[in-house]
Image: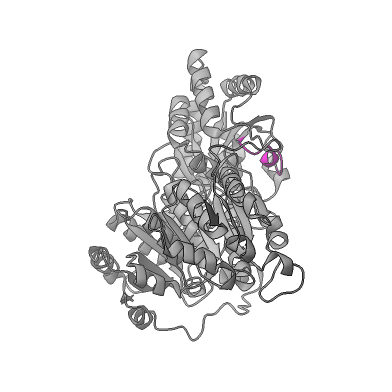
């Protein structure tokens, strides 16, 4: 029996076990939408903008560990989706994005709503396909899901012309897939693992640095066992937060541009650094030459060989799945009965604890003005550190990373690589649909939230009761901070004038709105909001306009050249910090 390409596509999604897809209809995909109407095995979520569809699918994937799926039409529908595609690509999130295309005879003729989706997305996808024969559709979808989730994950675009969705053929969905030119490594090289163990065993100031690859590789338990077996300090990237419990004593906090004092100094001054599923991006290592200043040796574990030695040269590269490699390292350490130099390790920890006593994240919450840090701390208290937190991009993102203790993987969703404003609300939607029993909160700012605020309508239609924490300082906060520090206080276009009444706006969309202006109101308001389990609550916190994110590693600076918060700047001089290094073993 022959069926249409649209029906084939739907049956392929069913065969992959898809439960939700996110999309927006248009002329080029109406055949697909008609086929979706006739089935009941997965739910389609109608967003209000295609960018939000891909972001929601992205978050759905991050929370569920499944491949997220989005469906958009041709032309502007496809181009609207590109920001979401690029966001997922930067953070290695497995997605399949199906875009409609004009009929194959019209391709290249500047037809109505025609764009070259394959060409546009080529720089920001793991792979893409243009299907020109309905007989290739099922096998292409099978390949797309395989490519998206294997090796280093990423988004895959399938561009489907309308006549392909209308054409008829027999349906067969492949049971497996083999792509000769695509065979990602999973097992680490035994010789390299042995070298890594030998180097680690000789370390006096060891350090573990982990990233989002540990989360994506489901290697959190192995990471914890490895770090605790060795008794060494560890630090995580923005994308790695939650892979190791933030409240555990061996975790020094996030590192990098807005990392903690102790994490940055320990990473700068260690003698052996084990990098696990992290890529030494510019927000972690601003200047590679300065990062090398103290002569450390680097063991770099990553599934993607192109990520190793891209910015910082690895002394011992190990290409493989982080879960598998960590397992081998643990087994090797135990089997060979290895042990670190106890005296040196104690001295190293003593130095780290000295840095830690500086309490770099301290802030003074006064009685009159709400500090954004206080809101995040109180949110953590009210949710018992257990909520799934999504964020947009800016100061509020960094405050969330610094002040909310993430203790499990897939608890923290943000755009780390691309830095996409507007992801927070669609991320919260996708997270809540993936994990309906979880508490989901979106930490955002008055600038970011307006970029996809139309999704309040989607939340109303589908009853998605997330909580929105709007840290409203009436500025594009991170832009203002940079203008203050590097541009002579010239606040060019960073002030947000003519803001909407967010309470009334939330109510207009059918939700609950709250405006919080006093510190004493913060905790009671949060408690009240989270009691409303079946309602979306938009909480507009009017916060201190002058707060900056510290510590901060500025452009061209090393990890040991931080701009510090006022309480440290007054007492910790450059000379004092330099003298600290003389105590290292």
Q: Which residues are magenta?
A: 302-311
User: Quick one: which residue is furthest to the right in this view?
Assistant: 109
Q: Is residue 357 above or below residue 465?
A: above
Q: Residue furthest top?
A: 336
Above or below: residue 447 compared with residue 427: below
> Which residue ends up furthest to the front in the rendered image?
1
Q: How many tags in the picture? A: 0
Q: Position of residue 196 (x, y in %)?
A: 61, 24
Residue 551 in sight here: no
Residue at (28, 65) in percent of width and height = 526
> Measured along the vertical axis of the image, is residue 585 above or below residue 141?
above
Q: Main secondary structure of the magenta part?
A: loop
Instruction: Choose between 61 and 487: the one closer to the eye.
Output: 61
Q: Is residue 84 magenta?
A: no
**Residue 522, quarter of the rendered image:** bottom left
Quadrant in which residue 246 is drawn = top left
């Amino acid at each position: 029996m022959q069926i249409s390409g649209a029906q084939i596509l739907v049956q392929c999604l069913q065969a992959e076990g898809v439960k939700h897809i996110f999309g927006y209809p248009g002329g080029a995909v109406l055949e697909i939408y008609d086929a979706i109407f006739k089935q009941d095995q997965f739910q389609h979520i109608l967003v209000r903008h295609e960018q939000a569809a891909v972001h929601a699918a992205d978050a759905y994937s991050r929370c569920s560990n499944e491949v997220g799926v989005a469906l958009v039409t041709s032309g502007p529908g496809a181009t609207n989706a590109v920001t979401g595609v690029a966001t997922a690509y930067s953070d290695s999130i497995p997605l399949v994005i199906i875009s409609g295309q004009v009929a194959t005879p019209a391709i290249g003729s500047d037809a109505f709503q025609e764009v070259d989706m394959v060409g546009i997305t080529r720089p920001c996808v793991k792979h893409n396909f243009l299907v020109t024969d309905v007989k290739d559709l099922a096998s292409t979808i099978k390949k797309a899901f395989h490519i998206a989730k294997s090796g280093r994950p990423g988004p895959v675009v399938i561009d489907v012309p309308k006549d392909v969705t209308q054409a008829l053929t027999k349906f067969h969905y492949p049971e497996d897939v083999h792509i000769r030119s695509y065979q990602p490594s999973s097992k680490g090289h035994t010789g390299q693992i042995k070298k890594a163990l030998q180097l680690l065993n000789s370390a006096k100031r060891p350090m573990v640095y982990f990233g989002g690859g540990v989360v994506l590789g489901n290697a959190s338990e192995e990471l914890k066992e490895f770090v605790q077996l060795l008794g060494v300090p560890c630090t995580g990237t923005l994308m790695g937060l939650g892979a190791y419990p933030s409240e555990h004593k061996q975790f020094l906090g996030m590192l990098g541009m807005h990392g903690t004092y102790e994490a940055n100094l320990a990473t700068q001054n260690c003698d052996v650094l084990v990098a696990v599923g992290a890529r030494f991006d510019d927000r972690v290592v601003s200047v590679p030459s300065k990062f090398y200043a103290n002569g450390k040796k680097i063991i770099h574990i990553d599934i993607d060989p192109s990520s190793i030695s891209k910015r910082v040269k690895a002394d011992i590269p190990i290409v493989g799945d982080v879960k598998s490699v960590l397992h081998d390292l643990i087994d090797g350490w135990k089997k060979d009965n290895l042990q670190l130099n106890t005296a040196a390790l104690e001295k190293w920890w003593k130095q780290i604890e000295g840095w830690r006593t500086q309490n770099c994240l301290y802030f003074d919450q006064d009685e009159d003005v709400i500090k954004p840090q206080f809101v995040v701390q109180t949110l953590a208290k009210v949710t018992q550190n257990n909520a799934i937190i999504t964020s947009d991009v800016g100061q509020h993102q960094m405050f969330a990373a610094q002040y909310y203790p993430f203790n499990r993987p897939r608890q923290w969703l943000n755009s780390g690589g691309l830095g996409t404003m507007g992801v927070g609300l669609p991320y919260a939607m996708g997270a809540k649909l993936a994990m309906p029993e979880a508490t989901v909160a979106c930490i955002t700012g008055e600038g970011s939230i307006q970029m996809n605020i139309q999704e309040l309508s989607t939340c109303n239609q589908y009853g998605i009761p997330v909580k929105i924490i709007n840290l409203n300082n009436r500025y594009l906060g991170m832009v203002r901070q940079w203008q203050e520090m590097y541009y002579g206080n010239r606040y060019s276009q960073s002030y947000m004038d003519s803001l909407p009444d967010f309470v009334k706006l939330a109510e207009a969309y059918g939700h609950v709105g709250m405006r919080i202006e006093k510190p004493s109101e913060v905790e009671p308001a949060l408690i009240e909001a989270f009691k409303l389990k079946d309602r979306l609550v938009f909480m507009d916190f009017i916060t201190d306009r002058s707060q900056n994110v510290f510590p901060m590693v500025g452009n061209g600076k090393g990890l040991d050249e931080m701009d510090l918060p006022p309480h440290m700047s007054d007492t910790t001089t450059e000379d004092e910090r330099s003298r600290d290094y003389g105590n290292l073993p």
